[in-house]
Image (tube, rainbow, N blue to C red):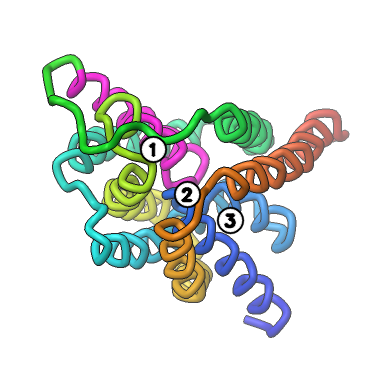
Amino acid sequence: MDRRRTAKIAGIGTVAGLFSGLFGVGGGVVMVPLLLLLLGMDERRATSTSLGAIVIIATAATLTQGAYGTVHLTEGLLVGVPALAGVVAGTALQQRLPAKRVSLIFAVLLIGVAASMVLSTGDADGGGADLDATRVALAAVFGFAAGVVSGLLGVGGGTLFVPGLIYVLGLGHVEAEATSLLAMVPMSLLGAWRQHRYGNLEVRTSVTMGVLAIPGALLGVVLANALPVRVLEVGFALLLLYVAQRLARRGLAKEVAPA
């Protein structure tokens, strides 16, 4: 692995780790586009390598959030267990989609995430809601959907875990982020293993990026527990919109490129 490539991987990992700790996502929304744009990976290899790195990043961030007492085990299981079935479905679906479509799908996802951040009206009350059958079922739907998105696009699923934990299970924003990180650890591990079996995972790159992301993830957790998140959310949304348009252009160009 040459120095320029290692430096790029370190930069991608650092930024992804910071965003993971700050927003309770796996960092895939940063890693996948940058792996595509900076390292020239194809879509399947980029999404698979992202999943492998997320295992390390989310584990480090979860342990740090646990020190703050913000991780909710029961709620994490309610969304995390259905996500295991979802990630199997998502990785299988990805093998059946033309690779050129994945960039466009990811661009749409990023636009949706950006819109949700800009339109967010603030924290839920927190503390958790009464776990009746309806809430448990809705949590399972969010978890399964997060797993499908994770397996298909190489993200941690936090973009669906966090809203489900807030609006269905009644956690506060920081608690939802922390619990989202917990839920994505086994899901990302399963997804990375599945992608390895398909021959898509670059193990060395995943491990390198994940390990180099740990300081950023720890800093992100500290900031998430110390700072108001509104300005950070808007800034992150703007970055997502920029990356989304780059990916959309890439996907559309591939659609019209000659054979």
Q: Which residue is mark 1?
A: 162
Q: Which residue is mark 2?
A: 23
Q: Nearer the viewer, mark 2 or mark 3?
A: 2
Q: Is residue 200 visible?
A: no
In the image: residue 80, left or right of residue 164: left
In the image: residue 27, left or right of residue 74: right
User: Considering the image in quadrants, where does the C terminus appear?
Assistant: top right
Alpha carbon of mark 3 to alpha carbon of mark 1: how far? Answer: 19 Å
What are the residue bounds of the magenta stretch? 135-164
Crowding at dot 1, Cα within 10 Å, few <14 / some 14-19 / many 20+, comes out as many
Tell me the SS state at disc 1. Answer: helix
Q: Of 9 and 72, which appears nearest the observer? A: 72
Residue at the spot x=31%, y=66% of the render?
A: 64
- Circle 1/circle 2 CB separation < 8 Å: yes
Say which mark, if any, is on residue 31. Answer: 3
Upstream in the sequence, badge 1 or badge 2? 2
Q: Nearer the viewer, mark 3 or mark 1?
A: 1
Residue at the spot x=59%, y=63% of the render?
A: 15
Residue sitting farthest toward the top: 134
User: What is the three-letter code of the residue carrying label 2?
Assistant: Phe
User: Considering the image in quadrants, where does the N terminus appear?
Assistant: bottom right
Compared with residue 222, is residue 188 higher up or lower down, i.e. above or below?
above
In the image: residue 91, left or right of residue 119: left
Q: Of 251 and 159, which appears nearest the observer? A: 159
Alpha carbon of mark 1 to alpha carbon of mark 2: how far? Answer: 9 Å
Tell me the SS state at disc 2. Answer: helix
Say which mark, if any, is on residue 171. Answer: none
Residue 256: give x, y in percent of width and height: 85, 29
